[in-house]
């Protein structure tokens, strides 16, 4: 990959920092409601996908943090196992949709599915905590997406009461816009590269090289 993505990643960090600020503001206002603590790990079992800019950022951070060796190999082995499990789950969800199960029920089923993140160690600590995705960073405070509110089941926020809320649609819109810029910067031949979303497990095992990104020169026929 020849493109310099330093500016793109710096702007991603700004979005990430804004997410941290929103979280801390809510925790400061309701310290008795936000019960996040070291070793909890509940958010490390949720299913969610990363936009391309975040996936590539996390992969870069992983490669910088873990040199080749037993720990890196163990994480990648867990990532491969998790990714296979996710593939089976998604295949099952797709079959349910084909059988006529309403999408909202499928999403509810996915939200209840628990699968350990490959970056979670034996003590329920994140091995890449400083570079963890935005979804991980705002877990534990009230959030809303598409008008639907959500909150961690281990928090003390009471249902039906008004609280400051992180509107994920706004953060996702900024990530989407930055991912489009990333795709433009890469000058990929894949016109829908910005639409690619991947689980963290797949992000760790993916080689974001010129072939994958579509920035190599295809052989002439």
Image (cartoon, helix red, strand yellow):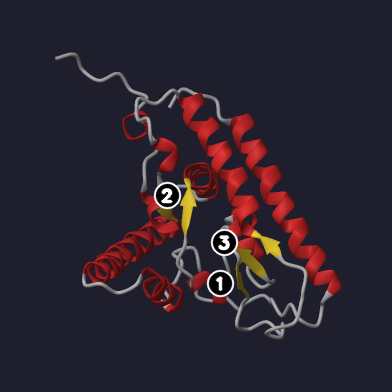
In the image, taking residue 64 as reference, residue 103 lies left or right, namely left
Q: Earlier in the sequence, mark 1 or mark 2?
A: 1
Disc 1 secondary structure class: helix
Name the residue beneath numbered marker 2: 197
Count neighbours of disc 3 (C-alpha within 10 A) and say few if under 14, some if 14 to 19, many if 20 or more: few
Rendered-image quadrant of the N terminus: top left
Pick the residue in front: 128 or 82.
82
Above or below, 192 against 30 in this view is above
- The residue at which mark 1 appears reads as 43
Q: Residue at x 85, y 70 (%)?
A: 28
Residue 146: mark: 3
Q: CA distance from mark 3 to mark 1?
A: 20 Å
Earlier in the chain: of badge 3 and badge 2, it is 3
Mark 2, secondary structure of its residue: strand
Q: Residue at x 21, y 72 (%)?
A: 99
In this view, the residue in front, 221 or 107, is 107
Whether residue 31 is situated above or below residue 78 in the rendered picture: below
State which quarter of the image contains the C terminus.
Answer: top left
Seen in the picture, residue 207 relative to 84 is either above or below; the reply is above
- Residue ID at (58%, 62%): 145
Q: Is residue 92 left or right of residue 116?
A: left
Distance in Å between CA atoms under marks 3 and 2: 18 Å
The residue that appears at 79% across and 68% down in the rendered structure is 26
Query: What is the C-alpha distance between the residues marked 1 and 2?
Result: 19 Å
* Label 2: how many Cα within 10 Å (few below 14, some 14–19, many 20+): some
């Amino acid at each position: 990959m020849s493109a310099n993505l330093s500016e793109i990643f710096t702007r991603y960090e700004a979005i990430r920092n804004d997410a941290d600020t929103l979280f801390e503001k809510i925790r400061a206002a309701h310290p008795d409601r936000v019960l996040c603590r070291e070793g909890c790990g509940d958010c490390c079992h949720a299913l969610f996908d990363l936009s391309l800019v975040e996936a590539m950022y996390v992969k870069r951070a992983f490669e910088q943090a873990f040199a080749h060796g037993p720990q890196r190999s163990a994480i990648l082995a867990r990532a491969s196992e998790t990714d296979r499990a996710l593939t089976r789950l998604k295949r099952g969800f797709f079959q349910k949709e084909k059988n006529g199960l309403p999408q909202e029920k499928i999403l509810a089923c996915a939200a209840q599915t628990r699968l350990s993140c490959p970056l979670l160690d034996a003590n329920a600590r994140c091995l890449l905590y400083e570079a963890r995705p935005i979804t991980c960073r705002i877990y534990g405070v009230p959030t809303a997406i598409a008008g639907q509110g959500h909150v961690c089941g281990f928090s003390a926020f009471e249902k039906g009461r008004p609280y400051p809320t992180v509107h994920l649609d706004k953060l996702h819109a900024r990530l989407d816009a930055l991912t489009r810029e990333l795709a433009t910067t890469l000058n990929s031949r894949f016109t829908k590269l910005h639409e690619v979303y991947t689980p963290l497990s797949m992000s760790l095992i993916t080689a974001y090289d010129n072939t994958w990104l579509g920035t190599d020169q295809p052989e002439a026929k």
